[in-house]
Image: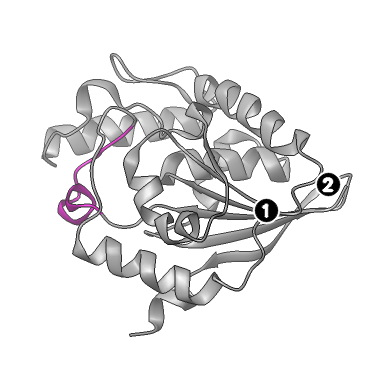
Amino acid sequence: MIKTLYIVRHGQTDLNKQGIVQGRGRNTDLNDEGRKQANQFFEAYKSVPFDKIYISELKRTQQSIQQFIDFGIPFEKLSGLDELAWGIYEGMPSTPETKAAFLKLMRDWIAGNLDEKFENGESPNQVRLRQLEALQIIMSHTEENNVLICMHGRAMRLLLCQLTGKPLTEMDTFPHQNLVLYKVTFDGEKFEIISFNNAEHLKND
């Protein structure tokens, strides 16, 4: 089975712009910049013959690729593609206290403590399990050769670790911005990133 996955992060929201963490519990809309990014991505990739689109259950992912859906490409929402839940810190303004809390959590994760999480939030290991379920669904459809996946920043980093066989402790080796693209191929045995953190489409006015 040969399959190509076009994995993108959603477009910008107001909370992105303000540097406020959204997470799984914040169902925000794209802002004007996010809608512009969505249009730029569509114009750059509208000629790709996508067989299926997979998105999270949060509306900012559907808004980011709605033009492809309007083309008539079938789509499916998978909760496994939702962003990591940041619990009590979702929607909170950036302060020295919140920054310190995030820094400590990131250090814990890098050190291998992947069950650590904020109160009412999710750990990387919890996200990994639901992503594996989503990935199983996506990969089970052998007739889908070109697949567009729209998801979220932290979740995307975790998914790319899983696809490439990297430990989750290396999640931060996958940079991203709003509506950046990772193009990943599957040759029947292994996944390979053939376009890494691609933002060329966002440079067009």
Residue 166 visible (yes or no): no
- The image shows residue 189 at horizontal and vertical percentages of 89, 44
Residue 14 drawn in magenta? yes
Q: In this rendering, is residue 30 above or below 38? A: above
Residue 13: assigned label: none
Residue 51: assigned label: 1
Task: Work out whether mark 2 precedes mark 1 in sequence or the reverse, and give the earlier one.
Answer: 1
Magenta range:
13-23
- Give the residue drawn at x 34%, y 57%: 11
- Give the residue drawn at x 58%, y 34%: 168
Residue 17 visible (yes or no): yes
The front one of 15 and 52 is: 52
Q: In this rendering, is residue 25 above or below 189? A: above
Residue 145 drawn in magenta? no
Quadrant of residue 82 within the rendered picture:
top left
Residue 190: assigned label: 2
Quadrant of residue 45 within the rendered picture:
bottom right
Type of the residue with mark 1 = Asp
The front one of 118 and 184 is: 184
Q: In this rendering, is residue 191 above or below 87? A: below
The front one of 80 and 194 is: 80
